[in-house]
Amino acid sequence: MTSRERVLTAMRRRQPDRPPFDFSFGFSPAQIAVFHARTGADDPYDYFGADTRMVWPGPTTLTTDYTPYLGAMPAGSTIDEWGIGHVPTTSRDGDHAHLEGFQYPMLSLETAAEAADYPLPDLDADYRYESVRSEISDIQSRGLAAMAMLECTIFERAWYLRSMERLLLDFADGSAFATTLLDRIAEKRVVQARRYAELGADVICYGDDVGTQRGMLMSVTMWRRWLKPRLARTIAAARAIRRDVLVFYHSDGDVTAIIPDLIEIGVDILNPIQPECMDPVALKRAYGGRLSFWGTIGTQSTFPFGSPEDVRREVRARIATVGVGGGLFLAPTHVIEPEVPFDNIVAFVEAVRGA
Amino acid sequence: MTNDTTHALIASLRQAVIDGDAKAAAATTERALADGLAASRLVDEALIPAMDEAGRLFEAGEFFVPELLVAARALKASQALITPLLAGSPSAARGRVAIGTVKGDMHDIGKNLVVALLQGGGFEVIDLGADVPPEKFVAAVTDQRADIIGLSALLTTTMLQMKHTVRALDEAGVRGSVKVMVGGAPVTQRFADDVGADGYADNAAAALALARRLMGRSG
């Protein structure tokens, strides 16, 4: 089986030769440095033989000036194409110098007209997908599965612009500002999803963190009012192009309460199933006929604090339970942070491969 | 003013905060103060019970983050009118908490909820923000006489900073004069014990109960 066949087989809930795997959102920079030192290799995905590769739209040619929205920024800050300010931490330590905070360009805007006027990036422009086309065909020609990234789809993108507290207050107030902002982001995402489907992506990766480790961040009622219809629209846009494109949805935390809704709007795969707050076996029992599970190996527990044998045991346990009949993709539940022992990463890969 | 009117005003202020109705909270506060109710009584009988109830509903899974945020906004609308009248009264001194997300970590939503509930619970809160180095926590004890230090972290990487912060308090010779409470998604009671904290809470409402316990009051 090629990697691509393995991913498609397992995620369509048929039995693959072994579960597919990758490294979720990758290695933190400190962990990459360890990887280079230990292996002498360049790329952990190539070195370990991960089954997927990710693609994003090509870079923008727009040069929008967002400084009127952001005001003064701390030294070392950068501004992304949405106008969101990224602020480095004061830490110069290699182990967490990669973490950053946000400066919110829409924090002090008030009216729906202001939300309508804010300059959004040209993610719907054709030229941004020329590289996507060639990257997908290159990935697939190597026998790998192409994952087209649509992360921070609507809610997270909106709160990176607005701040989470302001956006949640907007939701509570039923504000026209939030309606306009979410609609505008969703329109961009509809085009992006459609383009990914047209260009032959195997999996489209949607995601908005709406869970905490104690349950939903907002009530299911609020989620259904503000986020579900817009997420549904972006999924339907891809499905209208290709019925069989796989729809992956990521949310950290415990989002058990919205799983039936996610399945209803077309989600095939749920990620990352944090075992610290969601039980993968119970979910397999309840939803395994309609939903596949991607992740399940805890980066808050086993990866940083377990032994290599603990990692192997957790992987084998997942394969013997969640993996039965397909429907399991093994991965760390988030970025591999600096404190994860490198031997645990090696043990993870060996256990998945059955070595 | 009759007793009935007094009770009705206090009850409606309490309900306005729980419902997150900032306009009603401010209007009721104004009316109560104009009618001669003591500011400290509004705090003790309306604001503190209201945020306690919001915290209880949050713990019970009936309230979520947005409901807590609107309750905190209504609380602030009332406090803006009350606080100037409170200086020197007993309600102003339930304890002083200096709280922040530890060095290297910018995640502050959880910490902000704890701040809101502590303020609602009558604590004076010094919010040190996010990415706070150990020496700033030390200064909050030496310069601002904090009774409690609250440490938050979202990541397994940054929660190790809690240990450094407790050590810094130790080295500054102030560990004995301050209580340390910790929380955040990856933090456990066991980790709290390992770093030498005085207490751990797994959610914002529990953090308020813990702060009261650490000040020697029942939660």
Image: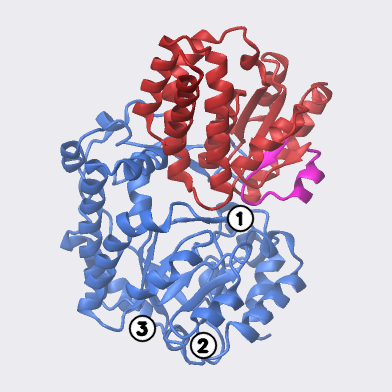
As shown in the figure, which amino acid type bears the numbered disc 3?
A: Ser
Q: Does the stretch in magenta take in B195?
A: yes
| Secondary element at tag 3 | helix
Q: CA distance from mark 1 to mark 2?
A: 29 Å
Q: Nearer the viewer, mark 1 or mark 3?
A: 1
Q: Position of residue B202 (x, y in %)?
A: 65, 47
Nearest the eye: B56 or B155: B56
Please tell me the numbered disc located at residue A106: none
Tag 1 subunit: A
Q: Which chain is red?
A: B
Please tell me the numbered disc located at residue A326: 2
Please tell me the numbered disc located at residue A141: 3
Q: Position of residue B120 (x, y in %)?
A: 55, 29
Q: Colour of chain A?
A: blue
Classify B177 as above or below A324: above
Q: Nearer the viewer, mark 3 or mark 2?
A: 2
Q: Is residue A31 left or right of residue B160?
A: left
As shown in the figure, which amino acid type bears the numbered disc 2?
A: Gly
Give, as a single range, the part of the protein colored magenta: B181-197
As shown in the figure, which amino acid type bears the numbered disc 1?
A: Glu
Please tell me the numbered disc located at residue A337: 1
| Secondary element at tag 2 | loop
